[in-house]
Amino acid sequence: MFKELLNDIEEELMVLEEDLLKTINTKRMLIRKPLENMINAGGKRLRPGLVLTAARFGNYDFEKARPLALAVELLHMASMIHDDIVDDSPTRRGIPSIQSAIGKDAAVYAGDYVFCKVFEILANEPAYVMKETSKAMSQVCEGEIKQKEDFFNVDLTLKDYLYRIEKKTAVLFALSAKLGAFSSQAPCKTAKQLYTYGINAGMAFQMADDLSDFIADSEKLGKPKGSDLKSGVITLPVIYALKKNGENQYLRSILETRNIGEGEFSEIVRIIEIAGGFAYTRNMINRYVKKAQEALMALPDVPAREILNASAKIIIENVNKTI
Amino acid sequence: MFKELLNDIEEELMVLEEDLLKTINTKRMLIRKPLENMINAGGKRLRPGLVLTAARFGNYDFEKARPLALAVELLHMASMIHDDIVDDSPTRRGIPSIQSAIGKDAAVYAGDYVFCKVFEILANEPAYVMKETSKAMSQVCEGEIKQKEDFFNVDLTLKDYLYRIEKKTAVLFALSAKLGAFSSQAPCKTAKQLYTYGINAGMAFQMADDLSDFIADSEKLGKPKGSDLKSGVITLPVIYALKKNGENQYLRSILETRNIGEGEFSEIVRIIEIAGGFAYTRNMINRYVKKAQEALMALPDVPAREILNASAKIIIENVNKTI
C-alpha cells in the first residue's frame, strides 16, 4: 500500500513537471529559457509532494489538488529566484542560478513573472485558498527581509533564528499541507494536524539545510560550501558557538569583518565543531522531526501517514549522511 | 457639480494616503522607513483616482471602491520599486529611489513585500477582482520584461513600442477603470467603455512620460533628464528619428555604443528635434487622448465623465507646458 501510493505520487509529480513548464510558456525569451532550465534542473518538489500526500486524508481528487501543488512549487521557485539575487548565489541545483545566468536585473522580473503566474492560478481557486496563500506569502516575505536585516548580526538569538526560519520556510510547508487537506475536504482537525506537521517538518528541513552549508559537499549541495555564511546568513551552529560558555569573542571578531574567505570559513567550522554547535543543531533537528511525527499520531493510520512519517525521517537520515 | 465631485475624490484620496501607510506597517524597519518615504513623497495617485471616478458610474460606495483603489496604487508602487532596480534609477518623486536608499538587494524584497500586500487585500475581494487583477499583473510583467529585452534595440518598431507601453502601463489604467465600475455594479457596457478610456489614456500618459525624459526639467521629473534613454529604454521619439527618411545611421551608431553620456544625449535630442520626432510623439499623444475622450462619449453625461475628460486633457496640457 505504501509503495503503491508512493508510485502514484511520483507519477503525479511527473505530470506536475509538465504543468510547471506549461505555466511559463511566455514569449519573452529573456526569461523563458532560464526558467525552463531551472525547472529541468530538478529539485525535490517537497512542497507539491506534501500537497498531494496531505490531500490523501480526505476524498482525494488529483484534479483539485493539482493547481494547488503547482502554485506552491511556483511560489517556492519565485522566492528562490529573488533570494539568489540577494544572496548573490552563483549556482542553484547544480546549474547557474537565474541571477548569474541573466543578471540580477532581469532576474528581478523573472521572479515577478513567476509570482504573477501564482496569482493567475489562484484566481481560479476558492477564496479560502487565496486567503491562506496570501497570509503565508506575506510571512515568507517578512522572513526573507528579516534574514537580510540580520546579515552578519552576531547578536542574533535562538528566538530570532526560529522566528526567521518559521516564516521563511516552515510556513510554506505548512501551507502545502493545509491546502492539500482543503482540496479533498479532509476534516478540520486533520487539516490542523497536517499544518502542525508541516511547520515542524519545515523547521527541521531548514535547520538541516543550514547545517549542510557547513558540512555537505558542494556537489550534493548544488552550490559552493559556506555560501550562506559568506553572504552573511547567521544560522544555528554559529549562534550556538557564539553563545557557548559566554561570548566567543574570537568567532565574533571574525564574523564582524564581514569578509569570510575560505580560510576564515574553515576556521569558523573548527570553532563550531569544538563548541559542539553541529551536535546541538542535529539535536534540534531531531527534536523538530519528532514534533512533526507526533502531529501525525493523531491522524488515521493510512499509507499517506506513513509517507509523511518517512519523509520526516529522511531529514534526519540526510543529516547523518553528511557527518 | 464638477468641483464638488473633485473635492470629494480629493478627500477620499487623502483617506487612501492613510490606508497606504497602514498597509505597510511591518516590523521590518529595513523596508518600512523607505516605503513610508516613498508614499510620503507623493505621486499623482492617478490609478486610485481613476478607480474612484469610474465607480461613480454606478451605485457609488466608497467602502467598496476603497480596497480596490488601494490595491492598484500598491501594484503600481511595487512595479516602480522593481523597475528602479532594473533601470538603475537614483531618484523617484524627487527623493532617492528605494534601490538607491537601501540597495538593490533589499529593494527586491521591498517590492515583493508590497506585492504580497496586494495579494492580501484582494484575498478579501470577489473572485472577479482577483481574476482581472492577475491577468493585468501578468501583462504588466511581460511589458516590463519586453522593455528590458529591448534595451538599446535600435530595430524596435512602432508596433513593438505600442505593445510594450500597453502592457507596461495602459493595462493598469484600464484595470483601475474596470475595477471602479465593478465596485459600483455599473452596467457592463459602461465598464467596457471605461476600460477603453483607461487603455487609451494610459497609452497617451506613457507616451507623454517618455517624451518628458527628453524635454522636461529634472526638478519636475523628480529624476535626472535622459535617465530612461541612458539606461537603454528606446521610446517613440527615438524610434521615429531612427526611421525617418530611411535609416538614420548616425543616430544608430550613437545608440549602439550603449554608452550615452550628457554629450551624446544632447546630440540625440538635436537629431530627434530635426527629424520631427517630438512633434510626431505629441501628435500621437493627441490621437490617443482623443480616443480616450471618444470612449467617454458613449457614457452618461455625469460629473464623473467631465473629470475623466479633463484628466485626459491634462495629459496634453502637461506636454505642451514642457515644450
Image: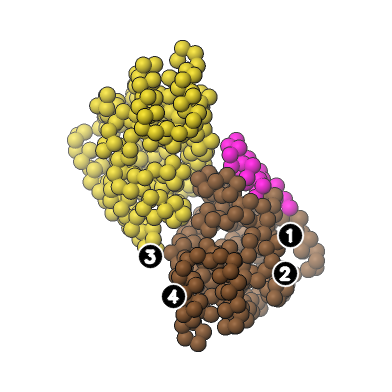
Chain colours: A yellow, B brown
Which residue sits furthest front? Answer: B263
Residue span colored magenta: B14-38
Question: Residue B9's mark?
Answer: 1
Circle number at residue B155: 4
Determine which residue is flagged by label 2.
B307
- Image coordinates for residue B191, horizontal then vertical, percent: 59, 68
Given the image, what chain letter belongs to the residue carrying mark 1? B
Q: Tell us which disc is closer to us: 2 or 3.
A: 3
Q: Earlier in the sequence, mark 2 or mark 4?
A: 4
Q: What residue type is disc 4 on?
A: Asp
Report, in whole angstroms, how far the alpha carbon at label 2 lies from the one at label 3: 38 Å
**Residue B85 at x, y percent in the picture:** 53, 53
Instruction: Kindly check if marks 1 and 3 are in contact, taking CB atoms under 8 A apart as contact.
Output: no
Instruction: Please give the residue where the numbered disc 3 appears in the rendered image.
Output: A27
- Circle 3 crowding by C-alpha within 10 Å: few under 14, some 14–19, many from 20: few
Kindly report which numbered mark, 1 or 3, lies closer to the viewer in this rendering.
3
Q: Residue at x 62, y 55 (%)?
A: B91
Q: Secondary structure at mark 1?
A: helix
